[in-house]
Amino acid sequence: MEIDGSRSLEFENGKEVPPQSQVLLLLADRVKRGLLGALLQERGFTVEGTDDWLTALAHLAERQPEVLVVDLSGLPQAAEGLAQLRQRVAQGEYVPRLVVLTDSLAADLVGTELQATVLTRPVRLGEVAEAVRRATRDLRCRCNPAATWSV
């Protein structure tokens, strides 16, 4: 349920049911994108994927997914794409929570202003899925402070 742009928690049989979060995958490797997408869908996320920055940036503006997973390996123009995300942050535009997959050499490209979760290779798909889950949990806690405090 969404009220005034903030998400509230829903319960089923006394247990919290997380809202279905939207995730955008930006990975050059089609096979990895498909495997990760299937795993995330199995865990209840709505997933879309692309292999280029232009499509991803248009998707962010149009659909505003909660999480963007970016694999910098094999992705053309990684530095430029991250610079465009930083520019969006500076201009106050919407930027989702980021989960960035990289090798240790490219980790410095991400910087701190994007507040990304950076996973350094080698990384398992389950670790990426867990990072996405944590990112969406953090968003729910930020949107609904009552969910994190017991009164």
Image (tube, grey):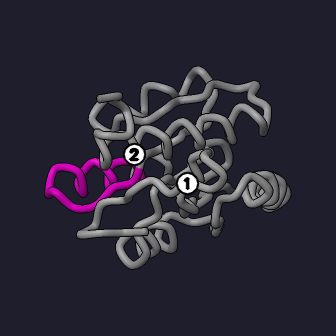
Image: 113 above or below 16: above
Pick whichever, 36 or 57, lies toward us: 36
Mark 1 vs mark 2, CA separation in Å: 18 Å
Query: Which residue bears the numbered disc 2?
Result: 139
Direction from residue 44 to residue 80 in the image, left or right: left
x, y percentage for residue 63? 43, 75
Image: 29 above or below 2: above
Pick whichever, 112 or 97, lies toward us: 97
Q: Main secondary structure of the magenta part?
A: helix
Quarter of the image where the N terminus is located: bottom left
Query: Which residue bears the numbered disc 1?
Result: 11
x, y percentage for residue 4? 23, 69
x, y percentage for residue 30? 79, 62
**The label number, if any, that marks residue 144 in the structure image:** none
The numbered mark, 1 or 2, whose residue comes first in the sequence reads 1
Instruction: Specify the segment rendered in magenta.
Output: 81-96
Q: Residue at x 38, y 39 (%)?
A: 147
> Magenta stretch: residue 87 in it?
yes
> In front of the other: label 1 or label 2?
1
> Magenta stretch: residue 103 in it?
no
Direction from residue 81 to residue 32 in the image, left or right: right
Which residue type does callout 2 highlight?
Leu
Q: Quadrant of residue 105?
A: top right
Residue farthest to the bottom, as pictured: 62
What secondary structure is marked by label 1? strand
Residue farthest to the top, as pictured: 104
Q: Residue at x 63, y 25 (%)?
A: 120
Direction from residue 142 to residue 15 in the image, left or right: right
Q: Residue at x 64, y 66 (%)?
A: 46
What secondary structure is marked by label 2? helix
Which residue type does callout 1 highlight?
Phe
